Image (cartoon, rainbow, N blue to C red):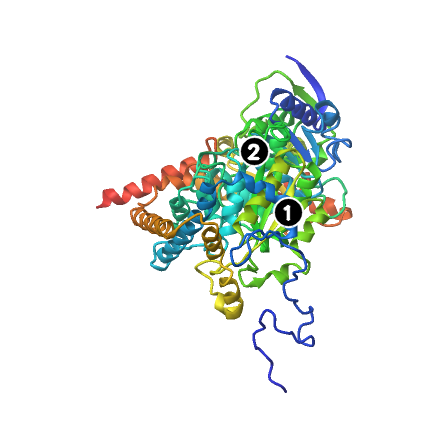
Amino acid sequence: MPEPDFAPQRLGRAHDDTKDRMGTVPETPDDAVSVQIISPEGRYEPNAAAEEFLPYLERVDEDLLRRFYRDMVVIRRADAEAGHLQRQGQLALWVPSHGQEAAQVGSGHAARPQDSIFPAYREHAVGMIRGLDLLDIIRMLRGLTHGGWVPEEVGNFHLYTLVIGSQTLHATGYAMGIALDGKSGTGSPEEAEAALVYFGDGATSQGDTNEAMIWAASYQTPQVFFLQNNHWAISVPVSRQSRTPLVDRAAGFGLRSTRVDGNDVLASYAVTAKQLDDARAGRGPGFIEAITYRIGAHTTSDDPTRYREAEELAYWEARDPILRYRHHLEQRDLADGDWFRSVDQEAMDLAADLRRRTLALGTVDVGLIFDNVYAEDHPVVREQKQWLAAYEAGFGEAR
Amino acid sequence: MTATTWTMAKALNQGLAKALEDDDRVLLMGEDIGALGGVFRVTEGLAARFGENRVMDTPLAESGIVGTAIGLAMRGYRSVCEIQFDGFIYPAFDQITSQLAKLTARHEGSARFPIVIRVPYGGHIGAVEHHQESPEAYFAHTPGLRLVSPSTPNDAYWMIQQAIASDDPVMFFEPKSRYWPKGQVDLEAPATPLHTTRVARGGTDATVIGHGAMVSVLLQAAEVAATEGTSLEVLDLRSLSPIDYGPILRSVEKTGRLIVAQEAPGFASLGSEIAATVAERAFYALQAPVLRVSGFDTPFPPAKLESVYLPDADRVLDAVDRALDY
C-alpha cells in the first residue's frame, strides 16, 4: 500500500487534480485594473483608471500630504509597540495592521467629520484619524473592556466587531437611518452624511456581508463598502474565498465599484473621497476593493510561516506603502531629512507613551460584569450583582 | 371604560399602529409586512397608512432584518422586526445573540438598542416543517435579551406597546394559534408592567403555569378538573425573561404543587428553569416535585401527529394527578 502524501500544499504551486477532488485553487485572479496614482517607485504616474478620481486630490494640501506620511509612520510604530506588549504578556492579543497603512490612512482621511465609520478590528489608523486614543484598543485587547470608546466622541468611529462581517449590516442599517433622516442627498457636501464600513476578503464569504450589499442596493443607502483585500483570511488565501476578482462581485449587487491599489495612499484617498461624495449626494452605495497585503500575522496568535511563502512576503515588502510614499514626498520636495526624522521621533514618542500608559492601566471594577447588560433595571442581574458583593464581603469578614 | 372585542391579530395591529402614531422613530421591518400585511395580516393596512419608510418590506434574509435594525438603533430608531415564522429565526441567531444581546453592554451605557423582534410561534395550526416551533429557550438563555409572550388580545395590545417602549431588546413571541379567537381589549386601563405574571384563574389544590397558547389549554384543564372537584390555579407567565417569580412562589406557597407546561421540548427549557428555581426557593412549601409537561425531545412532527406531540388538557391533568397522588 503506498504511503499517503501529507506534503503541505502551498499557494501558487500546481495542485495534483487526482488528489484535490474539489478542484485546484487558482492563483489570485488579477485581471481587474486597480486605480493607481503613485507608481511603486513613488513617481506621480496616474494610470488611465485614475483619471476620474484625480480632481479629488485637489482637496489635499501640502500639510495633508505630509499628514498621510506621518499617520502611516506613527501607526506602524504604535502597531509594533502593541505587538511587543503582547509578547511581553501585557496584552491577550494584538491585531497587526502592518502593510495596510495606505489603504487605511487614505480612506480614513477621505471621510468627512459628519460621516460614520464601522470598522472590523484592524483599522487602528482609521480610528486614530477619527480621534481615537489607541490605548482604548489596547484596553480591549488587554481584557479590560469589550468596547472601549464612545463612538460619538471619536468621530463616529464605531466599536470594533470581532464576528466577521456582522458590522456591514450595522453600517447599512445606520445608512438607512441617514436616508430616513433626510441627511443624504441634501445638496450640501458639508452637511450630508454617509457611512463607511471596513471589512476584509474573508468577510466577503459571510452571509451578513452579502445581505448588507443586497440591502444597500435595495434601499440605495448612502454608504461605501471598503474591502481591504489583504490576501489572507488567517491561513486561507483569497483564492479560496473567490475565483472572481472581488471587485467584480459588486456589480452583481448593483453597487458602483472601484478597485484601487491599497498600497497607494493617494489613490486610496481619491477613490474613497469620490465614492463617499457620491453616497452623500444620494447616488447610492459604493464598493471599493483595496488591494493590499497583511505583512504581519493575522493576530499575535497566528504563525504565517506555516502557510505562506517567503517569496510572497518579500514581494509585498518590496511594495511597502510607507517607503513608496516617502519616495513620492522626496521627489516632490515636500519634506526633507529633518522632517522625516521628526516624524520618526514623534512615532517613537507616541509608542513610548502608549507603553507607559499600558503598563499603568489598572484593573477593572467587577461592576462591569453586571452594569449595562440591560438599559433598564433587570431583577436577575441586579440580584446576582448583590449576591456577588455579599459573597466577596464574606471573605473579608472571615479574615 | 372603553373596551372592544378584537382578535389577537387585530389587537397587535392596533397596538403597532398606536406605537407608530406615538413615536415617529418607530419602524416596522420584515418580509411581506407591507402590501400583504404580513402572512398573518398582523400589519394589515399599516404600510398604506404610515408609508413605506415606516413599514418596510425587506429583502428575504432574517440576519439582514435584525442586523440593519441594529444599525438603525445606533441612529436613534426603534425597529420592530417581524420574523415570519418561528423556524425561520435561526439565520438571525448571530445578530440576535452575538450582536443585539451584547451591544448595550459592549457600549457600556453609551448606546441603547430598543429593538422588538416579533416571532409568531408554536403549533396547533397544522402547518409544514419549520412553521410550528417554540424556540424561546434558545433566547431565554442569552443575557441581554428580554422575552415576553401574550396569551390574550388585551395583553397583546398592551404588551406590544410596552415592548416597543422598552430601551432593551425584546423578543415578542406571538402564539399564532391564538391570533384568531376574539377577546375583550380594554383600551384605557393602565397596563400592568411588561414583566409580570398574571393569575388567569384562582385555585387552591395545584398551580399550573404556561405561556402563549398553553394558557388556554391550562384553563381548559382547570375547567375539567373543577368538574372532578380539583381546584387548579392557572398562571399566565407572560414574561419569559426575566421570570416574575413573586406570583409563582405565592401560588406554590398556597397550593404546594406546581406543573409547568410548554409546547417546546422539555430538556433545558423554560420549564426546567422554573422547576429548579421553585425547588430552590419554595422547597418546604412543595408537597410534590415540580412536574413538567412539554413537547417531546424530538423535532416537531409532521402536522398529522401534532395533536399527539403537543401537550393538551389531558396531559396536563395527568401531571396534576401525579402531583396530587405524590
Element under disc 2: helix
Where residue B306 appears, as percent x and y from the top left, is 73, 45
Nearest to the observer: residue B275 or residue B289: B275
Q: Residue at x 69, y 68 (%)?
A: A22
Quadrant where the C terminus of chain B is found in the figure: top right
How crowded pointer 1 is (Cα within 10 Å; few <14, some 14-19, many 20+) is rated as: few
Q: Where, by quadrant of the figure, is residue A149 drawn?
A: top left
Same chain for mark 2 and mark 1? The answer is: no
Q: Which residue, as the protein is rendered here, is positioned at the far left?
A: A399
Instruction: Determine the CA span between mark 2 and mark 1.
Output: 39 Å
Confirm whether residue B296 shows in the render: no
Residue A348, x across and y down, in percent: 34, 52
B15 vs A312, left or right, is: right
**In this rendering, does residue A9 appear at all?**
yes
- Residue corresponding to mark 2: B73
The residue at 29%/47% (across/down) is: A360
Left or right: where does residue A145 sit relative to residue A197?
left
| Mark 2 residue crowding within 10 angstroms, few (<14) / some (14–19) / many (20+) | many
Q: Between residues B183 and A6, which one lies in front from this camera angle? A: A6
- As drawn, the residue found furthest toward the bottom would be A1
Q: Position of residue A323 (x, y in %)?
A: 46, 57
Q: Which disc number belongs to residue A155?
A: none
